Image: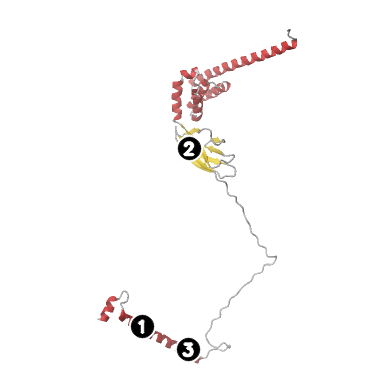
Amino acid sequence: MPLTRATGRALLMVLACATLTLASTVVEAQSADELLEQGIAQRRSGDDTGALATFQRAYDASPSPRAAAQLGLVHQALGQWVEAHTRLNEALAATTDAWVTRNRAALTQALAVIDGEVGTVEILISGSLPRGTRATLGAREITSFPMTRPLVVVAGEEELEVTAPGHRSVRRDVRVRAGQLSRVTVELRAEAAEVATTETTETGTTTETTETSTTTETGPIGPTDGGSASNDDWIVWVIVGAAVVVGAGVAIGVVASQQSLEAPLPGTAGAVELLRF
């Protein structure tokens, strides 16, 4: 069956696209290798910061195990322990890569040094998990709960803050030890509804105040007809009072004397015994 002109053009376009895609892939692979060589040269000259940018470009162009390893090593040189830990573990996970196989011993030794600088933290939420729970540990932010894997952080003390809408935030210091897993359990409590209640009692436009006064009258006992007690009445009352006082004193003395002869008084036993003898 002869090909038409339109069919021939369509085939040529497909072939051209396939050729361009293959060429682009080859160029990108070559470009990544060239960037890796350039980054290695920068590291040899002491420019680790420049090498970091170059290796990152190589990794973005082609995230090969070799690019991940070189990126992890330069992160280690710059003291960026968490990033170094991530990339070196990524490279060592490639068990079939020829370059990683040849350099596995050196990469494993570098990872051991990095492991001495980082630890892992797992944050657990006890009870119900509120929607929108977020946490920050130092400069790291966690937005997915429950956590799928522990968080790698630099060893030391970091401040943890866990928040959730409608719940009280929780803050605490977390001690992260190198090479160890630290688990932190947090309970999020709902905020108590604060309702301000104001009671107003209205009694009208006029406020009446009722005052109650109590009057106590004191005065001499005597006539209440408005006159004053006579001097004779006053003398009589004095004599009666004196007689009452004297009589009471005599009665008390008799009773006391009888008690002293019957039993010892507390604290004076010796004197009573002499009286009895």
How far apart in space, not on screen, are marks 2 and 1 (Cα)? Answer: 86 Å
Residue 214 percent location from the top left of the image: 58, 76
Residue sitting farthest toward the right: 5
Mark 3, Cα crowd under 10 Å, few <14 / some 14-19 / many 20+, is few
Any part of residue 156 in sight: no
Name the amino acid, label 2: Arg
Residue 164 percent location from the top left of the image: 58, 41
Residue sitting farthest toward the left: 277
**Looking at the rendering, in which quadrant would you find the C terminus?**
bottom left
Q: Residue at x 65, y 14 (%)?
A: 18
How far apart in space, not on screen, are marks 3 and 1 (Cα)? Answer: 28 Å
Residue on which the image places disc 3 = 237
> Disc 3 on helix, strand or loop?
helix
Mark 1, Cα crowd under 10 Å, few <14 / some 14-19 / many 20+, is few
Tell whether 260 sits left or right of 27: left
Residue on which the image places disc 2 = 183
Q: Earlier in the sequence, mark 2 or mark 3?
A: 2
Mark 2, Cα crowd under 10 Å, few <14 / some 14-19 / many 20+, is some
Any part of residue 113 in sight: yes
Tell whether 228 sits left or right of 246: right
Name the amino acid, label 1: Val
Name the amino acid, label 3: Trp
